[in-house]
Amino acid sequence: MIDVSRPVGALIKEAGLTQKEVCARTGIHPATLSRWVRGERKVPAGAYATIYNECEREILKNGKKKRS
């Protein structure tokens, strides 16, 4: 289950990714992601799931421990 309470910026930081890397991997426009990270716009559910999955994949790949 996806924990939607975590801000997008926190997911990206925890995964050790840059916004540029997330954009390249997900196809999200950099300006759009930046607005979501800054909290200027709400993240659509589908986009949040895409970012979440990519960040979780990176965390598991690098053996980083997930925060609860």
Image: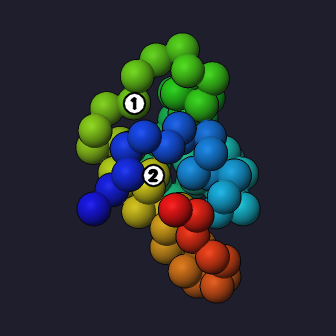
Q: Determine whether 12 is above or below 47 in the image.
A: below
- Cα separation, mark 1 vs mark 2, equals 10 Å
Q: Is residue 31 visible?
A: no
Q: Indicate the position of residue 9 as horizontal and vertical percent values.
A: 62, 40
Please name whichever residue, 10 or 25, is drawn nearer the observer in this view of the structure: 10
Mark 1 or mark 2: name the one nearer the start of the chain: 1
41 lies left or right of 66: left
Residue lying farthest to the front in this orientation: 68
User: In the rendered view, would you say 6 is above or below 63?
Assistant: above
Q: Going by the image, does 67 lie left or right of 43? A: right
Task: Please report the residue visible at 62 percent of the width from the left and 45 percent of the height from the top.
Answer: 10
Q: Can you tell which mark lies on residue 43?
A: 1
Task: Give residue 24's position: percent from left, percent from top.
Answer: 57, 54
Q: Are marks 1 and 2 in contact (CB under 8 Å)?
A: yes
Amino acid on which disc 1 is placed: Val
66 is higher (above) or lower (below) than 13: below
Q: Tag 2, which secondary structure?
A: helix
Amino acid type at image mark 2: Ile
* x 57%, y 51%: residue: 11
Instruction: Identify the residue under disc 2.
Output: 51
Residue 37 showing in the rendered view: yes
Q: Quadrant of residue 63?
A: bottom right
Residue 7 percent across, percent down from the top left: 53, 38
